[in-house]
Amino acid sequence: MDVPGLLAAVVSPLADAVTPAFVASACHADRVSVPRSLRHEACAALRDAGDETLGPAA
């Protein structure tokens, strides 16, 4: 995630879907975590935004 705006591109669909997310940013990496109980909704929101996910299918 070293491209400006990339983190915003990941969390914006989650915010639009009202899915809470925990974001941790460091020098070499960014991490976005969502509650396990909302993982299907989070993956669906990212897929709907045009992202490819490796997470659970809806």
Image (cartoon, grey):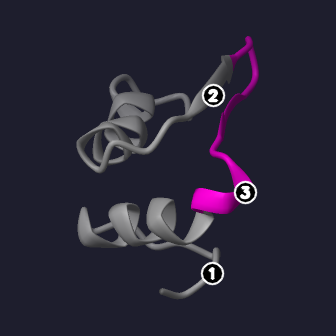
Task: Inspect the magenta stretch and tell me whether residue 26 lies in it.
Answer: yes
Compared with 20, 48 (above or below) is: below
Q: Amino acid at mark 2?
A: Phe
Badge 3 crowding class, 10 Å Cα cut-off, few under 14, some 14 to 19, many 20 or more, is few
How many C-alpha atoms fall within 10 Å of the one at disc 1: few (<14), some, or many (≥20)?
few
Quadrant that contains the N terminus: top right
Which residue position is annotated with label 2?
A: 22
| Dot 2 alpha-carbon crowd within 10 angstroms: few under 14, some 14 to 19, many 20 or more | few
Relative to the observer, which residue lies in front, 42 or 8? 42
Mark 2, secondary structure of its residue: strand
Give how far across and how far down residue 51 sits, in percent. Answer: 37, 66
Earlier in the chain: of badge 3 and badge 1, it is: 3
Whether residue 29 is situated above or below residue 17 in the rendered picture: above
Going by the numbered disc 3, the residue's amino acid type is Arg
Residue 56 image label:
1
| Residues shaded magenta | 25-38
**Which residue is denoted by mark 3 in the rendering?**
36
Is 34 within the magenta?
yes
Query: Which residue of the protein is positioned furthest toward the bottom in this rendering?
Result: 57
Q: Residue furthest top?
A: 27
